[in-house]
Each structure stands twice: as structure tokens, then as C-alpha cells.
Image (tube, helix red, strand yellow):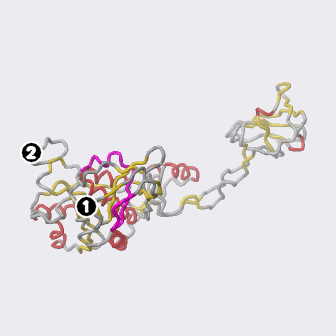
Amino acid sequence: MKTFEEALQIVLDTSFRKGSERVPFMKSIGRILAEDITSDLMMPPFDKSAVDGYACRKADLGNDLELIEVVPAGKMPVKTLQAGQCIKVMTGAPVPQGADMVIRVEDVTTPDVNRISSPAGQKKNNICLTGEDIKTGEIVLTSGTLVEPQHIAVMAAVGAVHPLVYKKVMVAVISSGDELVEPDKTPPLSKIRNGNAYQLCAQIEKCGAQPDYVGIAADTEESTRKMILRALDGNDMVLISGGVSMGDFDFVPQVFRELGIEVLFEKVAVQPGKPTVFGKRNRQFVFGLPGNPVSAFVQFELLVKPLIHKIGGNSLKPLMVSLPMRNNYQRRKADRMSFIPVAINDQSEVIPLDYHGSAHINSLVEAQGFVSLAIGNKTLNKGEFVNVRFI
């Protein structure tokens, strides 16, 4: 049985980078950049006004100035400014030649339609200088960036309309167990609806990968083997939930080996999720996840998600924040590392959620993250600062 740290290192050490492809930038949300994005121009590309106001010379401040032109954003000034003159400019408009400051509209008075009275002593020039934000050729987004909406704006601004991104990681999902029926069916006694597959598919999509739901494997070696072979066809990774523990019908580790998959570990010293299996065959990876939904969810977050991100070009660094416990927490056993679901209240305090065990999927509904207890540690005390690993 591996510790969590050992299991994670084994998983990450087996990874590789997928190939890359160019996509329209609006299709790159959730994808990982496979190249640096550089700017093809200066930003701003000209000296522009930061305010609605009047462009003038500092030397003329305190005097009445002749208004000779009005320049909206998107238009170039026609006239060159001379002493005693001003040009009205809108926010974002180019600053005319001869001007070295812009007075805000609200800071002037207008004796008539062609003249303003400028204030004396203004220091702020209200001009955004050419290239002060970005220089031509400057890197604006680095390779390995997970593309989010704010990055789309940057790509649009620098003309990177077909960025190079890593190809999506293709992940097959299988559920195992004769007790399962699909969610659109009413389960008879002794059976339950299949929630794991759809939970895992949603987690896969949230990672920016592509899920491929294969179906429910019956509790036979033949069905398990057939489903895994189908899942391996065209996918980078296979997740099968259930069939990995010590029951009479838990065939997954055995079938993995029969299919030439090198099993690298079968148990992890964590709670929930001890019977987690990981293996590889050439450039494909397989996870046998526990059948209980909380265990499957947690092990995806801990082991599967980092591998998906690394294969897809991004080294995942989970968001961890140190916050105080709202109340005491105690567990019965401390022989494994434990991950407990928690919420954060309005005072930024950590509240352990009502959690009955690894089958209690409702315990995750309000969960914002997990807090871990190391092997040998049974308690967390009120006021103690703990690291919250956000989901």
C-alpha cells in the first residue's frame, strides 16, 4: 500500500505531453497553450487620452484656450496644436501633435462654444503613452497557461486568433456492477442508479478533457475485459469505478494484468479511497477507482486530475489556503491520511460537513474543498489553522 505522496509521484512520473493543434481562439477556453503568445503591436499603439477632456500644452495652463477640433475615439486628429489652442478628445482618442497633457472635462469652464478656461497648476497629464502596457514582441501569455476568459481578451488584442494548444486528453469512463441501472431508470430493490460515471464525466470536462462514457460492466471477467478493451480504443486514459476491492466479483486488477497493463499500485493509504488501482500500457493509463461515490470523487481530485492536467500540458497546482477551524473535529482511526469535505463560512472559518462515509454523496453538495489529516493525527482543534484544498 502506497502513501498518498508516493502514489501521486508514481502517477506523475509516468506522464507525457500530448501533441498540439491550432484552434480558433474562441474554442481555446479550458485548453492549455502549447506556445508563448507574443504581441504583434504596441499597446497602446499611440499616445491616447485616458479621459474625456481637452488636449493642450502644459505651458498654456491657466489661460483661456481656443478650441480648434473635436476628436472622437477611433479617429486621428487632423490639426496640430499651437500655443493658446486646445483640442477636445474622448477617452481612447489619439493625443494630437503639440499636446503634452489632457485636462478633464469637469475641470474646465467654457465661456463660449469655441473657448475654454483652463485651470492652473495641474500635474497629471492623463495620457497613456505608446507601448506603456505592452511592447511589440513581448510575451503576453506563456506556454502552459490554462486558457480562461481573461486570456481570450489578451489574444484578441494581439491578434492571436489561432493559438497552438495541446490536444484534449481523451478519458473513457466505465462503471462496474450488476447493482447499477442508468439514471433514467427506476431501480428495483437491490439496485441503485449509476451516479459515478456521470460525476466522473463532469469532473473530466471541468479539467478541459474529453469524456467518453462506455457503459456499465457486468460483474463478470468477460464483461469487464470487453468494456476495458473498448475503452482503451482511442483514449489516453480509462477510469473504471467499482470492482477494485476484495469482493468475489472484483475483477478489475486481474483483468488489467491480463490485458498487458502494468499495475503500479493497488492500494493507497488514504480515506476515503483506499482500494485505488493505477496502471499503464505504453502511452495509456488506467485507474480503478472505488465504487463509492465520495471515494471516486476524492481520488479523481487527488490523482486523476493532476495526471490529466500534466498530459494536457499544464502542471496543476491545487489552490491551498490556510484558514482557522470553526469547531473541533475528531475521527475514530488514524491509520490512513484522511480527506474531509469542508465549507467556508462568512468569517472565513472552516466547517467540516456532515459526512457519514464514502457512500454519502450528499456530503459533497456544500463542499468547497477538503482538509487533510495526516496518518496518526485524529483531531483538528477549534481555531487551528488548516490548509483547505479547494475543489
Residue denoted by label 1:
239
Please name the amino acid that badge 1 sits on: Leu
**Where the C terminus falls, by quadrant?**
bottom left
Front residue (pair 4, 286): 4
Q: Measuring from the top left, give residue 264's x and y in whole percent.
A: 26, 74
- Where residue 375 sits in the image (x, y, percent)? 33, 68
- Asked whether residue 1 is in view, the answer is yes
Which of these two is toward me, 328 or 9?
328
Judged left or right of residue 328, residue 108 is right
Taking the spot 62% from the left edge, 61% from the top edge, the residue there is: 138
Highlighted magenta segment, given as a residue range: 360-380
Residue 148 at x, y percent in the picture = 48, 51
Q: Secondary structure at mark 2?
A: loop
Give the left or right position of residue 330, taking residue 30 as reference.
Answer: left
Q: Earlier in the sequence, mark 1 or mark 2?
A: 2
Q: State the CA–CA distance, disc 1 to disc 2.
A: 27 Å
Crowd rating for badge 2 (residues with CA inside 10 Å; few <14, some 14–19, many 20+): few
On screen, residue 124 above or below 237: above
Query: Which corner quadrant of the image does residue 284 belong to?
Result: bottom left
Q: Are marks 1 and 2 in contact (CB under 8 Å)?
A: no
* In magenta segment, residue 175: no
The nearer-to-camera label among 1 and 2 is: 2
- On whether residue 369 falls in the magenta region, the answer is yes
The local crowd at label 1, few if under 14, some if 14 to 19, many if 20 or more residues have their Cα within 10 Å, is many
The reply to whether residue 234 is visible in this rendering is: no
Residue 189, by quadrant, is: top left
